[in-house]
């Protein structure tokens, strides 16, 4: 893996990662739906009816419904059985597989589109997961991969105040800058064709010790959205990519 990527904490095994996400989906993550971002990512992929889509680390699986509504055949895979049980309880018709995103159980050139929404950074070996996404993507297909920025505005302020980036709500995490993530993706089978920003209001859980900055940021965000936040200082980044070449499983 590219050593430029900042590593906060990495799971020791797939079982540790699964246990972590089972616990998270029993808690706050089991209630979290990022519908707006999925809608944007499907638009950036320029999905066409009749295509086939895969959501890698699909979690609760709501993205599959959104893809289906656009005329796609949608599949999802996730390491958390808790997430998949919740997903099936909500919609039993969803095409879901329990598995590890580093070993996708589909043949080469299986999908026209692949989503990976804020998940690749949690993999034990994200470079393997990246190559797997490129492998199952058709030669003319596209992937949209959202990844966290190590130098978003809130993180920079937190470094100023405490010497470290914002604490995360998940156990295992990696961060990098826009250029570092782009280099990483292009070293592992992709050509990045566009980059899009993703920002959210400053969550209340991060209010303590941030005082005036917390209020100012949220006021600006409420009034102007993220129009005033530069791409390179955005909270997360979505990379729309094409597979550079067919990548075979190691």
Image (cartoon, helix red, strand yellow):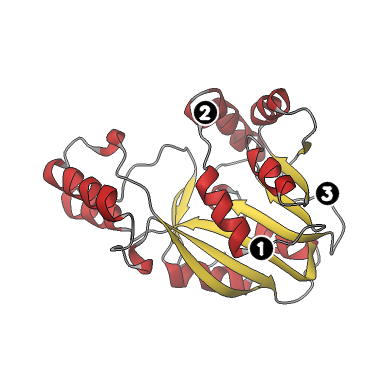
Quarter residue 75 falls in: top right
Q: Residues within 10 Å of mark 2 (few under 14, many from 20)?
A: few
First in sequence, mark 2 or 3: give its number: 2
**At numbered mark 3, what does the secondary structure look like: helix, strand or loop?**
loop
Residue 205 in percent (x, y) is at 30, 33
Q: Distance between the residues labelled 1 and 2?
A: 26 Å
First in sequence, mark 1 or 2: give its number: 2
The residue located at (60%, 49%) in the rendering is 124
Q: Is residue 162 left or right of residue 27?
A: left
Image quarter (top left, top right, bottom left or bottom right) of the N terminus: bottom right
Q: Mark 3 points at which residue?
A: 105
Instruction: Check if mark 1's residue and mark 2's residue have beta carbons within 8 Å.
Output: no
Q: Name the residue under label 1.
A: 143
Image quarter (top left, top right, bottom left or bottom right) of the C terminus: bottom right
Q: Distance between the residues labelled 2 and 3?
A: 28 Å
Q: How crowded is mark 1: few (under 14 residues within 10 Å), some or many (20 or more)?
A: many
The correct choice, above or below, for 105 with respect to 228 in the image is above
Quarter residue 137 falls in: bottom right
Is residue 54 in view from this perspective?
yes
Q: How far apart are marks 1 and 3 (CA)?
A: 17 Å
Q: In this view, does 183 lie to the left or right of 246?
A: left
Q: Which mark is residue 31?
A: 2
128 or 206, which is in the foreground? Answer: 206
**At numbered mark 2, what does the secondary structure look like: helix, strand or loop?**
helix
The residue located at (25%, 51%) in the rendering is 223
Furthest residue toward right: 107
Residue 57 in percent (x, y) is at 65, 44
Disc number lying in front (2 or 3)? 2
Q: How crowded is mark 3: few (under 14 residues within 10 Å), some or many (20 or more)?
A: few
């Amino acid at each position: 893996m590219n050593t430029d990527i900042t590593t906060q904490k990495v799971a020791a095994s797939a079982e540790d990662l699964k246990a972590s996400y089972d616990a998270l989906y029993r808690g706050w993550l089991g209630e979290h739906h990022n519908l707006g971002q999925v809608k944007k990512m499907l638009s950036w992929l320029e999905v066409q009816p009749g295509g086939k889509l895969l959501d890698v680390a699909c979690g609760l699986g709501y993205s599959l419904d959104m893809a289906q509504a656009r005329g796609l055949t949608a599949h999802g895979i996730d390491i958390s059985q808790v997430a998949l049980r919740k997903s099936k309880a909500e919609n039993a018709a969803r095409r879901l597989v329990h598995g590890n995103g580093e070993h996708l159980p589909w043949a080469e050139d299986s999908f026209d589109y692949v989503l990976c929404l804020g998940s690749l950074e949690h993999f034990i070996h994200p470079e393997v997961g990246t190559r797997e996404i490129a492998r199952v993507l058709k030669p003319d297909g596209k992937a949209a991969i959202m990844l966290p920025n190590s130098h978003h505005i809130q993180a920079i302020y937190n470094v100023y105040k405490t010497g470290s980036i914002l604490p995360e709500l998940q156990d295992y995490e990696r961060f990098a800058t826009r250029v570092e993530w782009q280099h990483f993706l292009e070293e592992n089978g992709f050509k990045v064709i566009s980059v899009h920003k993703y920002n959210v209001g400053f969550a209340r859980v991060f209010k303590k010790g941030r005082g005036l900055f917390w209020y100012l940021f949220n006021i600006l965000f409420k009034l102007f959205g993220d129009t005033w936040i530069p791409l390179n200082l955005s909270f997360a980044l979505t990379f729309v990519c094409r597979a550079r070449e067919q990548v075979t499983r190691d």
